[in-house]
Image (cartoon, rainbow, N blue to C red):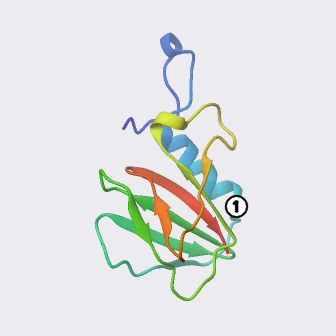
Amino acid sequence: MNYGLWNFKDRNWGVRPVYTAWANLTRHTKAGDIVYGCASSAPGHVEAVRVGKFLFWVNQADRRVQVKIQGADPVSAHAYTESILSGDRECGITLDPQDGLWPLPATSFGRMDL
């Protein structure tokens, strides 16, 4: 993954995945919001933080994982991967839970609305 926010002129200044992750966080939070770390049963693979009514997560594993959110009942969830990014706005996919488990795509990041 490239860590700059934009590509160079020869690639039409397109946004990179880290831009979308950063934009996702900053569009749904404001200065002064308290960020709460979340415990993970798979640290190093799935990490998350809660800010207000949102849970922001990243799945660093190279495979899809199923997660159960304890202490909150997500209303909806959106995931982003390098292969589905286009533009700089909502370009992810909507996740659908099955039996209380949320499927997080491999090497993805996203947001759950609580």
In front here: 106 or 1?
106
**What residue is shown at x 64% (from left), y 74% (from top)?**
74
**What residue is shown at x 30% (from left), y 73% (from top)?**
42
The residue at the far bottom in this view is 71
How many marks overall? 1
Q: Position of residue 52 (x, y in %)?
A: 67, 76
**What residue is shown at x 46% (from left), y 70% (from top)?**
48
Q: Amino acid at mark 1?
A: His
10 with respect to 86 (left or right): left
Residue holding disc 1: 28
Q: Position of residue 17 (x, y in %)?
A: 49, 39
Please state, as top left, top right, bottom left or bottom right, where the C terminus lies in the image: bottom right
SS category of the residue bearing label 1: loop
Quadrant in which residue 12 is drawn: top right
Q: Position of residue 96 (x, y in %)?
A: 60, 61
6 with respect to 26 (left or right): left
Please state, as top left, top right, bottom left or bottom right, where the N terminus lies in the image: top left
In front here: 98 or 47?
98
